[in-house]
Image (cartoon, rainbow, N blue to C red):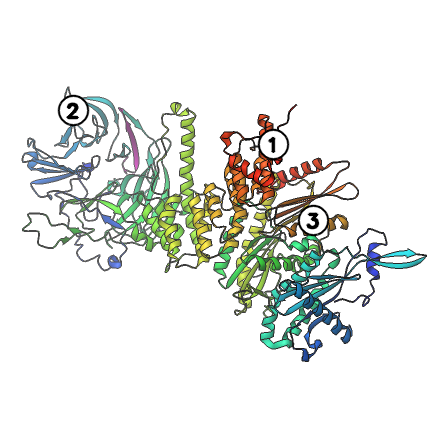
Amino acid sequence: MVSGGCRPQAQDGGGGGGRPGEAARSDPSQFLHLQPQARAQRGREKKILFYHPNEVEKNEKIRNVGLCEAIVQFTRTFSPTKPAKSLHTQKNRQFFHEPEENFWMVMVVRNPIIEKHKDGKPVYEYQEEELLDKVYSSVLQQCYSMYKLFNGTFLRAMEDGGVKVLKERLEKFFHRYLQTLHLQSCDLLDVFCGISFFPLDKMTYLKIQSFINRMEESLNIVKYTAFLYNDQLIWSGLEQDDMRILYKYLTTSLFPRHMEPELAGRDSPIRAEMPGNLQHYGRFLTGPLNLNDPDTKCRFPKIFVNTDDTYEELHLIVYKAMSAAVCFMIDASIPPTLEFCRKLDSIVGPQLTVLASDICEQYNINKRISGAEKEPQFKFIYFNHMNLAEKSTIHMRKTPSVSLASVHPDLMKILGDINSDFSRVDEDEEIIVKAMSDYWVVGKKSDQRELYVILNQKNVNLIEVNEEVKKLCATQFNNIFFLD
Amino acid sequence: MAAAAGRQPPGPAEGEAPAAGREAGAGGEEGEGRAKGGVEAGGCYLALCARPVHFEKANPVNCVFFDEANKQVFAVRSGGATGVVVKGLEDRNPISFRMEDKGEVKCIKFSLGNKILAVQRTLKSVTKNANILGFCWTSSTEIVFITDQGIEFYQVLPEKRTLKLLKNQSINVNWYMYCPESSVILLSTTVLGNVLQPFYFKSGTMSKLSKFEIELPAAPKSSKLSLSERDIAMATIYGQLYVLYLRHHSRTSNSTGAEVVLYHLPREGSCKKTHILKLNRTGKFALNVVDNLVVVHHQDTETSVIFDIKLKGEFDGSTTIHQFVLPPRSIQPYQIPVAGPPSVTSQAPVPCKLYSSSWIVFQPDIIISASEGYLWSLQVKLEPVVNLLVDKGKLMDFLLQRKECKMVILSVCSQMLSEPERGSLSVIATVFDKLNNEYKKYLEAEQSYTMVVETGLSRSNPLLKRPVRTQAVIDQSDMYTHVLSVFTEKKEAPHKFTIAVLMEYIRSLNQFQIAVQHYLYELVIKTLVQHNLFYMLHQFLQYHVLSDSKPLACLLLSLESIYPPAHQLSLDMLKRLSTANDEIVEVLLSKHQVLAALRFIRGIGGHDSISARKFLDAAKQAEDEMLFYTIFRFFEQRNQRLRGNPSFTPGEHCEEHVTFFKQVFGEQALMKPTTF
């Protein structure tokens, strides 16, 4: 946390290209957990469960943690239930999050720097208003959710083996996870952490339902199932909050990792294995690599769901045929055997292959009927808090790890600002912003839904912008109650 | 065809089967079949009807005849001099009369409608030197005589008490057979007797259908009659006329037993061999056709088997080979009710000897015991079939073709949803699909009928009939009432299974493009809510699996207190219905979202006709002065625009709100009328 200067931010300045107004990139500088309620005599150092970067000198770690603790305690005086969430300084933003009682997570993000020349000498200037609090506090919360998905709660780790086990788990998880965070490209979508749903007609949807029900019956140890197509969700047997983070894991980590071999044509999935077996395209994305190898390991990632009440530990089996992916979750007390995996492969593989091509065919038919093949004329982001449905025509197809916005960062920042305004009131609202160079940004909030539209038209006035947005609502959102 | 074993070949006048007089017991059947047949195994799916026709059993002075056309038994005492008693299965009141004894009666039959009685007493015809083989009534006033030299079709003129020849045809006849249901007479011709010539009768016309040859099992060595009428039967199966030929096991061929060969006899076109029913046994057989099933009785084992030609068989390119549907079973044991004066009836009912050699079998479903004086119709019992046919898909195929199938099918559905015989989801899906396939066929027929009637095309097509709703049409309300609502209430099954079954039924309905009734959706919602599966419900609604309707939207609204997102789901649904704008306004006003309601109604252009009072009431209840001001001003402006004056008319009943407005904002805040 805190601290500038522990890593020079030259690359950030470079990202800004030195041009004024260009949004500079931010980078996590430090990331740590601390436990402020620990007895003072154990010393501050003992409170630090995880600190990144670890190379930071011990005293500095202690100082930084102390400062965080002080700020939180101090602000508690004014608001006992809602202490400070973030601290703005010239060089940094600090974000505080207490996911479990007495466990604190702090993330420090450096403000972007731009390089200016004064009297022929370079001068670094911090852009103090570039970062959006909501974006990074959401990122911090998701860090916890992701940790919890794969490790359970902090408290559970403490119960399992005290601080030592918790520290090990934190180290193991965050060591890898922090490398996958792309803080530079975080934006409004990270605030929503939504789920993209695959559009589908009723009949095909019912077929998928039928498939899932039959699979759960045949593989009776399966407790929950989720079904995705094209990296978009179709069905979740998990509760919404668990699915939200699992979806994030699947779409930002697991699927991208397996996409490349597919594209490269390696690992050709068509197999004619045991005689009499139907040819199919099914394969495991987690678990055994080769079902014919008797020594293959049937180890699946464990996940923790419903941690607020039933606290379930599950094996996560992800199985994919063409663009259709199914997550089967089975109770962790039943270790899946090779025999089970073979059975799953032989039952699910052929049926999922057929289903996947059905979905593809039906989707293309529906697309043709609705005429949705045309490129969307509007750049917009839609989010529904009720079902976490998210849709963006602003972001490009997800690359292996991130999705990139196709518009200027300044516009993305305006979207973020409008979102912050929305979150302050309960009422339905509409905000129209005239941005630079013929851009208009419109934000609409109706009940639990938010819509952000970016328009780029020369010489239009407010009324015309309003008309355009109405047009968009009439075509894209005519089947929901979305007030004009 | 003919009767159970042991019977002598019937006399030349076969049609009316002189059931009596033939001494039966030649076979010594006593005790023989008992051990083999597995009669005691239970699951008897064939039964004799509970109310048989009882007649005086045959003896030297009492001759008994059966008329297949009217299904009547004639008991003729002393050639009719001491009385003739006629009884039928349908007509419960016996007809009794006397007639002069002019010699032995060979054949006796009423015309259709019991108006005219025809009696044959001699084999020789008066006019020609031909033997009369018999006669048949084809209508109430038309009669056909069959002689060994031809066929003669007459109209009876009752007033003149004469016959008028309508048509005749010379042909050498070995024997004949009449199928009253289809008005077809079949004549056996040629020396071997295996070339069959059918004639069809309809309102005064006799038409010759194309003749056909029955393939005999082995080439006969001598040129003598090789096809017996006992081995031939005619029956209507699934609306089509078939000639059934019982082909006995021949030692020369390598067949595993006897078989029944079905020849389809269409009204036009040629007769074709279409089905072979494998009996896999040898011995003495008799055939019945009941409920479109071919029943084959086997006397040696005292069991019967049934065949359904609509079920899948093995198709060899021209004919379909069928195995029997169910394992062989005996006809259900039958107790002969002891009749007579009450003082005598104390004795126990006598068990009836089944498959007795004195049984004679007639088409389609008649069994007569001449020695005991009973006539039964044979019936198929569906309940025992349920346990004999393990494959539920095949069971449904079988049941759906039966007349009285509805309750049995519904009970099979209930059974497969509950322990201990719970079916797998794929079996359940198959059953639902089969039911809905039948259901859809009916809906389509009904729809095209309605369309023809509505467009007035029915006059040009007098043959058009309203489609008959058979018991095989199991609709959503049947399933809901008898199966699904009971099943969901029992709560014995895991909720996952319950929901999977409901979704499977909805999936099947959708697959057959049948509009799902909203009570099924309500059942799904109720079940999901009971188990707190709100996220599941949300997803179903999101994909419009539960189709939009006002009742459903209202149900969702009622769920808001336990599941807040239901509010949004409900509003979305009302919006999509596009006929529920008033409801949307009400919902918004009830939540004090007065501005939202106003914006909505303005968006659809209905703001000029809404009640100002309603909105002002809601605004006042919201206890938000600025909101009240805004709404009040909106209506003042509307008044100005519509009437040229911002004030409210007495009819709007807004005095209370005007007073309130003045109280809060002062009189000067009221809008001034604009004057030009």
Badges 3 and 1, same chain: no
Q: Quadrant of the C terminus of chain B?
A: top right
Q: Is residue B198 magenta?
A: yes
* Structural crowding at the residue carrying mark 2, measured as other residues with C-alpha within 10 Å and reported as few (<14), some (14–19) or many (≥20): few
Relative horizontal placement of residue A260, taking residue B249 as reference (left or right): right
Q: Amino acid at mark 2?
A: Thr
Q: Quadrant of the N terminus of chain B?
A: top left
Badges 2 and 1, same chain: yes
- The Cα–Cα distance between marks 3 and 1, rounded to whole angstroms, is 32 Å
Residue bearing the label numbered 3: A418
Please give the name of the residue rendered at 41% of the width and 24% of the height, measured from the top-left corner. B456
- The extreme top residue here reads B160
Q: Is residue A401 visible?
A: no
- The Cα–Cα distance between marks 3 and 2, rounded to whole angstroms, is 112 Å
**Quadrant position of residue A69:** bottom right
Up the image or down, A16 lies above or below B292; here it is below
Q: Position of residue A468 (x, y in %)?
A: 68, 37
Residue bearing the label numbered 2: B127
Q: Position of residue B614 (x, y in %)?
A: 51, 37
Q: Secondary structure at mark 2?
A: loop
Q: Return the residue nearer the eye: B441 or B455.
A: B455
Q: Which residues are magenta?
A: B189-204
